[in-house]
Image (cartoon, rainbow, N blue to C red):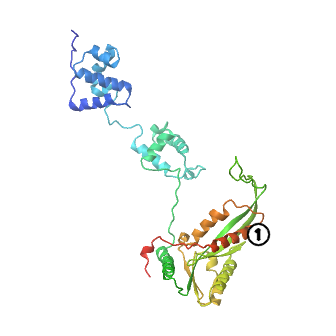
Amino acid sequence: MPKARARQVVLDESQRKELEGVSRSRTDEARRVQRARILLMAAGGATDNEIASAVSLNKNSVRNTIAKFFELGIYGALGDLARPGRPALIDDEAKTWVKSIACTKPKELGLAQEMWTSRSLAAYVKGHCKEAGHVALSKVSASKIWSILDADDIKPWRMTYYLERRDEDFDKKMGDVLMVYKEVEFEIQADEASGTVFVSFDEKPGIQAIANTAPDLAPRPGMGSVARDYEYKRLGTVSLLAGMDLVTGEVVPLVRDTHKSSDFIDFLKIVDERYAAAARIKVVLDNHSAHTSKETRAYLETVPGRFEFVFTPKHGSWLNLVESFFGKLARVCLKGIRVSSKEELTERIYRYIEEVNAVPVVYHWKYKMDEVTL
């Protein structure tokens, strides 16, 4: 008969549940899993030899684990130095300090870079944690820094953009622009002229004339893309002043080297000649200084009642429908364009707009239109 143990291992319900959880764990340390099984089997009446055979240990190891249980309880027997809930090595105060550093730009801490990377942030934390009183961070890894910040969704190595409303009358001006679009919508549905022309206007400055230094190679079997030499030559820039008729979709262009008040006035003269003398021309445009300059105001006085300007809010040029056309122009005509001169660039812009006007597209504004009533 196997010799009975001098003292029987007795577990209460909470101890049993905890040991059972450890014994079934696939992520806990192997020695903790073994020791939990030892205590459970001992509480079930198994002998030391039976336990040793079941957990693949020698009898002395089994006895040592049971002895620790009697002396230190289950946490001592499992090898822990303290009960659950002991303070983490990196405490909440240290984590808060890491987050505060992450939310401070590196340049404000004397570094050259504008934004953190996980590695540079970890290096800074390890280099300054002792003086901040957080010695536990002296060996912190970049991945640990990432996990600390991720708990609060802090990602200082990423950048998103926002639009600050710097115009106190933003909502009112937006409402004025949307009212124009509502009038356009009504006129299109009514299918009859109201005596008002609606034009969405803007400039696209700095369109670069770029020349190849070697000819492009056309696609061919085995090389399906256009091949282009890396080197190129800059020939200067031009500016496109464009107004889009919001009812017909046709675009009125003017290409110049600059976009000064005189250029804007020349554009207005082209529009003035384009439409019937009795029509009122309502223009949606931004707050560029050329649109309100002394020269522009002087010209408008020579054609009283002809033009009505509806200004988008400051930093609200996205409300201007002609931006949709400029986006298409950039994607279809200007992307990757190579020319031999600024004159060729100008000619190709005009040619593209002729192609657009041959099959014009009427753009319809949708945002907040259900809130506008005539």
* Residue at (51, 65) in percent of width and height: 163
Which quadrant does the N terminus fall into?
A: top left
Which residue is farthest front?
Answer: 221
List x then y, in percent, for residue 225.
68, 52
**Residue at left offset 55%, top offset 50%:** 109
- Among the 4 quarters of the image, the one containing residue 59: top left
Give the structural element (helix, strand or loop) at label 1: helix
Q: Nearer the viewer, residue 321 or 95?
A: 321
Is residue 130 visible in the rendered structure shown here?
A: no
Q: Quadrant of residue 267?
A: bottom right
Please determine whether, in this image, residue 70 is positioned above or below residue 222: above
Count of numbered badges drawn on the protein? 1
Is 312 above or below relative to 211? below
Q: What is the crowding at mark 1: few (fewer than 14 residues within 10 Å), some, or many (at least 20)?
A: few
Q: Position of residue 279 (x, y in %)?
A: 58, 88
Where is residue 5 shown, x and y percent of the image? 22, 15
Q: Is residue 43 left or right of residue 239?
A: left
Give the answer, above or below, for where 105 lies relative to 252: above
Note whether residue 332 is visible.
yes
Q: Amino acid at mark 1?
A: Glu
Q: Is residue 201 left or right of residue 218?
A: left
Q: Nearer the viewer, residue 81 or 145?
A: 145
Taking 150 as reference, is 312 above or below it? Answer: below
Q: Horizontal and vertical percent for residue 125? A: 51, 43
Q: Please name the residue that numbered disc 1 is placed on.
A: 343
Q: Which residue is rendered at x = 55% and y = 78% of the image?
A: 247
Q: Taking 161 as reference, is 2 left or right? A: left
**Where, quadrant-wise, is the C terminus in this rendering?**
bottom left
Front-most of residues 139 and 225? 225
